Image (tube, grey):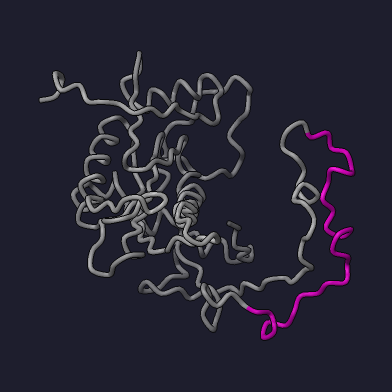
Amino acid sequence: MFKCPVPPEFHEQVKSGDTVVDDYSTLFVDLIPIRTPPRYTPPKEFFPPRYNFKGAIDQLFVADDVFGKEHVLPKIDESGRWENIVSNVGAPVCMPSLMTHVIPKGEDLNALIIPPEPKLKNKIDILPGAAPKIHKVIACTWAATTFRTRGNRANVNDGKRRLQEWLEFNLLSGFDHIYVYDNSGAFTNEDSLADVIGLFDKSQVTRVDWPCKICSNRDGNEGDRSSQYAAESSCRLRFGAHARWLGSFDTDEYLVPMGDFNSMGEVADKFDEDGVKVAVFKSSPAKPRFDLLE
């Protein structure tokens, strides 16, 4: 994933949504790959280790030392442009994600900003100019009407039922907004999760059409869920900046607030109070308590 280098003079226009007219972009950028020699040596020679990094010069990757300084940008017509994502006039610059999916153009975003999180113990403040926070806790999921499990062990055809139940639970447990990356289009043009998502208010659930197919570089191993990983990255980059906490889940994964906590919002407040930045929860199978079910 990378951030598109839109020139600064266009930032305010893109931010306002004025560069998109009748759902068509009027602003495009060219994406040109820079060709450099292939890397034949181990990755550790290019990327500093994350653990116990001492900052020694021999642990650093210096591009000039490896690739030299004689490389120049190729001409656009000779650059091998990324045909799968660009047209003959370049890649369209869309409206901001919140304006596209959540908040209609013209609505005052500042009126939706939630109070800032409590001061953390490590005294890290919100960075100046940071994206406005409009939700405390949001969730992302990558789902489809039908899909195959890892290793193609089983075909699951009840994606709609699973999603509806999962959405109902997570909204009840305290998630403010849920983003569903609908991967149904990777398998069919005749059905999607739109009718299930339409059962919920747009202020709570947003559908993002995501027909990207799984691409595996190991024949027969469909466990390489590149489409899912790309969806999670997209959700984090597009919507994560506008929430205090974001979680990524499958529709068979349920996060249950327990103990003294009655909602995921309360859990998030406790994390903020303790200075927690990333939370990983234990996953374990559970059986329903039929005596507590209606």
Q: Is any part of residue 102 visible from this angle? A: no
Q: Is residue 57 above or below residue 7?
A: above
| Residue at screen point 45% across, 56% down | 222
Q: Say whether residue 77 is magenta.
A: yes
Tell me residue 204's x, y (percent): 29, 44
Q: Magenta segment, which residues?
A: 53-80
From the viewer's perspective, is 159 left or right of 234?
left
For the C terminus, give its image quadrant. Answer: top left
Tell me residue 170's x, y (percent): 29, 35
From the viewer's perspective, is 225 left or right of 72?
left
| Residue at screen point 83% across, 58% down | 63
The foreground one among 118 and 61 is 61
Q: Is residue 46 above or below residue 170?
A: below
- Furthest residue in direction bottom, as rendered: 77
The foreground one among 212 and 158 is 158
Tell me residue 268's x, y (percent): 43, 26
